[in-house]
Image: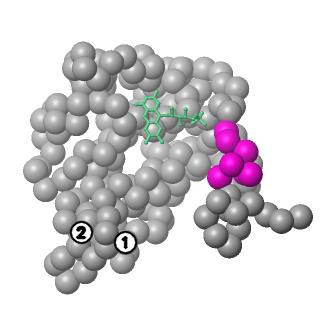
Amino acid sequence: MDTIEAIKNRRSIRKYKTDPVDEKTLEVVLEAARQAPSWANTQCWKFIVVRDTNIRAQLAETIEANPTLGRNPATKAFSTAPIIIVALAEKNISGYFHGNTATDKGDWWFMFDVALAMENLMLAATAMGLGTVHIGLFDTARVASLLEIPNEYYVVEMTPLGYPEYQPNPRPRKELSEIVFYNKFGKSRIV
Ligand SMILES: Cc1cc2nc3c(=O)[nH]c(=O)nc-3n(C[C@H](O)[C@H](O)[C@H](O)COP(=O)(O)O)c2cc1C
């Protein structure tokens, strides 16, 4: 599958088969994450691969545990998908220059770097017939405690990794004319 095809075929997958994902396949998607660009090549990311059934169930609870977070449609995937990947970012690296934050975004660049790595991972997964979904709505403090993550790291997101039960229909997207300007903000293309 070429890149454009993988971008178009990627869907958020929330229903998975229980079929296992072998180590070689897992390594291909992790390698895609490793190759992502990052702030000054700092690579602040870490990935925790969870295959353990009990820990996967406890991770699912971190989504539903806090009633103020609301229901998350991705929760059920944790009991079927054979793998959950938790993405972390080491603090105080991305966005820094000589020990100080270098832009108006402060240290938010860790979100950018992890997103690039995770989207690489997800596109590689799509190309191999696997499903994923970015999951941001969960109790990060509970995940940090459950997985014994040191305080020097942010818990950023999670995704199941497994074979999709089915291929969902594409979600709608804004038209290019709504999101692209030419030369100056708000200017549409003059034809
Ligand atoms: C930063 C981010 C956080 C997300 N968090 C969740 C989530 O917690 N639960 C969920 O089911 N989907 C989550 N999604 C998936 C989006 O709902 C999904 O990408 C969007 O509806 C478009 O659908 P598509 O991915 O199939 O194109 C998240 C996506 C992003 C980019």
Relative to the observer, which residue lies in front, 157 or 128? 157
Task: Tell me where residue 109 appears, x and y as whole percent.
Answer: 34, 63
Count up the numbered dots: 2
Q: Looking at the picture, which amino acid does disc 1 mark?
A: Trp
Q: Horizontal placement of 158 versus 170: left or right?
A: left
Q: Secondary structure at mark 2?
A: loop
State the residue position of label 1: 39
Relative to the observer, which residue lies in front, 182 or 100? 182
Task: Tell me where residue 118 appears, x and y as whole percent.
Answer: 45, 50
> Image quadrant for the C terminus?
bottom right
Q: Which residues are magenta?
A: 173-179
Residue drawn at the location 29% of the way across and 23% of the way down:
69
Q: Residues within 10 Å of mark 1 (few under 14, many from 20)?
A: some
Q: Is residue 154 above or below residue 165?
A: below
Q: Looking at the picture, which amino acid does disc 2 mark?
A: Ile
Pick whichever of labels 2 and 1 is earlier in the sequence.
Answer: 1
Q: Is residue 167 visible?
A: no
Q: Is residue 85 above or below residue 115?
A: above
State the residue position of label 2: 93
Q: Secondary structure at mark 1?
A: helix
Residue drawn at the location 10% of the way across and 50% of the way down:
151
Q: CA distance from mark 2 to mark 1?
A: 8 Å
Task: Tell me where residue 168 appears, x and y as whole percent.
Answer: 66, 25
Looking at the image, do the residues carrying marks 2 and 1 touch, with CB atoms under 8 Å apart?
yes
Residue drawn at the location 70% of the way across and 63% of the way down:
187
Task: Residue at the far right: name it.
Answer: 191
